[in-house]
Amino acid sequence: MTEPPLSLEPGPYQQSKFSYFKLSFKEHGQIEFFRRLTEELSQKRWESTPMSQPIPTATNSQTGRTRAVGIVGIERKIEERRKETEKNISEAFEDLSKLMVKAKEMVELSRSIANKIKDKQGDITEDETIRFKSYLLSMGIANPVTRETHGSGTHYHLQLAKQLGDILLAPLEERGGMMALTEVYCLVNRARGMELLSPEDLVNACKMFESLKQPLRSVCVCVIEESAELFLFDFLLLEAVSCGSLTAEEFAKLLGLSVLLSKERLLLAEKMGHLCRDDSVEGLRFYPNLFNSQA
Amino acid sequence: MSFEWPWQYNFPPFFTLQPNVDTRQKQLAAWCSLALSYCRHHKLYTLDIMEVQESPVFNHKNIDRKLSTEAILIVFEELRKKGNLEWLDKNKTQCLVMWRRPEEWGKLIYQWVSRSAMVNSCNTFPPEFHGLEEWMLIRSLQALQTDGKAEVITMDDGKGVKFF
């Protein structure tokens, strides 16, 4: 058996002056243990398998992990696991300490800026502004649009919409052009880090998408009154359908989605009244809802 | 003059009962309008469900679409609610189609009667009354009676009408 480290309490004994030992079970398990114990005693497996060899030295490492049975093996495993955990924790702390260093810098910078503003002492140096902006950039926001800079109301929301448009383009593409507004909310606020958006501001900004003439014009918000859920208007779908009609399979192929997801989107657009269906022996197709749009 | 089909007639979804409630309302309204105008054009007053399924109205062979029996019955129910249709039997196999309701007919009759009374000559029924079936006529007169504008009199050799 291994030589226990001195710091540990006296561990497994090789010999004992007692011929019995007492096991105490704090929270059940005694019945199961007893059953297993009697089973093992009857099988006497320890007599068939050899006891582990003396601790394998480095010369045995050609087999890689050496096989060890019995208590030694267990001890070894525990030790390995402990080392692994220690390694992981220290790595994590490395990142964290780096983060803390950065955060400390940021905190100091923002404190100095705040003081300057408060004392109206001199201007914020260009250097400081640049540093501040670079921190923001690294967190995903180039120029946070805040109520202070752009006021409140529609102008604010319009500016916000523009900013959202830039942020959301890539994530939307990844998700096949559609995201629930709750997802947008999380994503955007995570990127902002500070000056978080309230749900109301987000909704109002999204409603402005329509009036923007940019790629994200293709996305705007529709509020479904019955459920309090907000969904982004599936304009990608509607553009696809506007050239005629679509089946779930055709739409899936067009956008590289699963058929299941494509069907979901078609059904949702139908529920919202943007599409209508044609169900025949040829299959289920969806058309733009001309019942609504044509007089 | 040939019958003019509405744009919906060439729109395949028109022949599928729409699950979306709002869409369905619009769809049914269009069907009611089409059914009535078709009957008016061809002066049809009674319809048989089995026959009607194969008529060009509900079976558009060109686009290979037809309205299901279930949907036809729903359309007819709408017509009934609006007062344009009456079932002749409990099993809903035959119905009367009033593309002009009795009240509307009554008004027309009264107007015609008023005109001809002024002219004071023997008049034949004008073209718009051609094909008006007796049951429809009677109902129209009854509607006028309810309105106080006419009275149906039973005489020895039939019925007569007195206009006020």
Image (cartoon, rainbow, N blue to C red):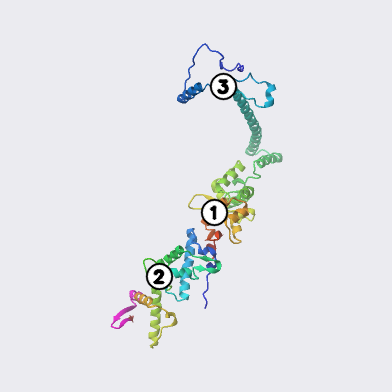
The reply to whether label 2 and label 3 mark residues of one chain is no
Q: Please, is residue B2 above or below residue B26 in the view?
A: below
Q: Amino acid at mark 1?
A: Cys
- Camera-side residue: A30 or B153? A30
Q: CA separation, marks 1 and 3?
A: 73 Å
Q: Position of residue B104 (x, y in %)?
A: 40, 74
Q: Position of residue A235 (x, y in %)?
A: 59, 55
Q: Is residue A185 visible?
A: yes
| Label 2 CA crowd tier, 10 Å (few <14, some 14–19, many 20+) | some
Q: CA separation, marks 2 and 3?
A: 93 Å
Q: Chain of mark 1?
A: A
Q: Residue furthest top?
A: A17
Q: Chain of mark 2?
A: B
SS under mark 1: strand
SS under mark 2: strand
Comparing marks 1 and 3, which lies closer to the viewer?
3
Q: Is residue A26 visible?
A: no
The reply to whether label 1 and label 3 mark residues of one chain is yes
In terms of sequence position, does the residue under pointer 1 or pointer 3 come before the other?
Answer: 3
For label 1, the residue is A222
For label 3, the residue is A48
Q: Amino acid at mark 3?
A: Ser
Q: Position of residue B58 (x, y in %)?
A: 49, 68
SS under mark 3: loop
The reply, left or right, for residue B74 in relation to residue A121 is left
Q: Which residues are magenta?
A: B143-160
Q: CA separation, marks 2 and 1?
A: 44 Å
Picture quarter containing residue A238? bottom right
Q: Which mark is residue A168?
A: none
For label 2, the residue is B95
Please name the residue shown 39% across and 85% down the image: B116
Please name the residue shown 61% across and 20% down the image: A52
